[in-house]
Image (cartoon, helix red, strand yellow):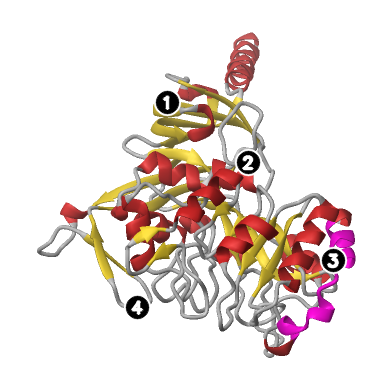
Amino acid sequence: MIKKVFIAAALFCSAGFAAHAQKYSIVIKGGHVIDPKNNINSIMDVALKGDTVMLVAKNIDAKEGKQVVNAKGLFVTPGLIDMHSHNFFGTRMDQTYSNGPNALPPDGFTFRTGVTTVVDAGCAGWKSFPDFKKQTIDASRTRVLSFLNIVGEGMRGGTYEQNVEDMDAAATAKVAKEYPEYIVGIKLAHFNGYNWAPTDRAVEAGKLANIPVMIDFGGSQPVLPIEELFMKHLRPGDIFTHCFGQLASREPIVDVKAGKVKPFVYEARKKGIIFDVGYGGISFAFSQAIPAIKTGFYPNTISTDIHTGSMNNAMKDMLNVMSKFLAMGMDLPAVIKASTWAPAQAIHREELGNLSAGSRADVSVLRVLDGKFMMNDTGTFGFFDYTGTKVTGKQKLEAEVTIRAGKVVYDLNGLTNPIVVSRR
């Protein structure tokens, strides 16, 4: 009897010691950490506890983690931030992106590509934001933030988005200030016409709420001059999305004939204008991006403009867009920065997009696929734009493990031990 009591006590003490030793919920072992905020670009381990990053260091004891992610040969980055997304999905078939069929439920398209935060780009306006919050933001595991549309009805399409009278700066700013945890900026989108009033009302709302504005010119004939937009209407920190678009109804940033970035674009960058990819369906052309990248004009932020049209066409997903920029000549740390820390700064959410101790435990574990293993004659991956222009690249990014708020929410090849992928 004494022997049994002794054994039971020993087992209890052993269990207690093990529990004490496991001071982290997750340890990510042996990966190449790229954390642009902290200038980390080397093989390191990452320790998480709950929804917080605790430590980035060499040789963290795997026994200290309740779960261990084997990241050897992989890249470990802050959770990716897609700063231009469309997520107010619904069943109102005549409302396009605002509670309609063109937007996407975020969780189905984020974690499998390493994205942990999306910013909905104007699907909801001040009239519809409460419904968007209840239906999408509150129900999603992905962190969903929002650029609030200057149009009260939001991105409903048709005449709604052309109604300047529904562009109420005061009402928009009021709702933005009521939901500061979720609304990070103001959006102007899809307005067609030679008229600065929509831009100015969006900027006015941004001033009233003290948040940035994202501008998507719908188009006009003649085109609205973007030098005037940058220098006379926008403020430092405001965002020009679709920056590599080339359409007849919008002025491009690269002079098509000369193949060079226009001089005033550099001045706009010095002023503090943020150039965002916002890839979309027809808003990215290699004829703009390649000359810009070759001369060192990189986008500040990489984003998808994902919706039901773009996801099945040239854009596909966040990692495909990032891979295109690798193929065009950006190095991996620059691509990661434009997809993590830079968007976090642009939306004033500095607790995101980095692996500093105390930051949110959103982490992406990525594999860089090598084209030489492709079953083709070129040993490369192919990337095309909506015009049919194709470029090839030797590398392509793939998500292996995604961690959101300290929980494994996606594991492609079972690299987590024990394998426990959180369902909620």
Q: What's the residue type where badge 3 is placed?
A: Ala
Q: Would you identify the image quadrant in which residue 207 lies?
A: bottom right
Part of the protein shown in magenta: 160-176
Q: Position of residue 322 (x, y in %)?
A: 41, 54
- Disc 1 is placed on an element classified as strand
For marks 2 and 3 on the same chain, the one whose residue lies earlier in the sequence: 3
Which quarter of the rendered picture does the N terminus lie within?
Answer: top right
Q: What's the residue type where badge 1 is placed?
A: Met
Relative side of 204 to 245, left or right: right
Check disc 1 and report the residue beneath it: 44
Q: What's the residue type where badge 4 is placed?
A: Thr
Check disc 2 and report the residue beneath it: 352
Q: Which mark is residue 169?
A: 3
Residue drawn 59% across and 73% down?
224
For marks 3 and 1 on the same chain, the one whose residue lies earlier in the sequence: 1
Relative side of 175 to 21, left or right: right
Q: Position of residue 68 (x, y in %)?
A: 47, 34
For marks 1 and 2 on the same chain, the one whose residue lies earlier in the sequence: 1
Residue 33 or residue 298, whichever sits in front? 298
Q: Position of residue 195 (x, y in %)?
A: 70, 77
Q: Are marks 2 and 3 in contact (CB under 8 Å)?
A: no
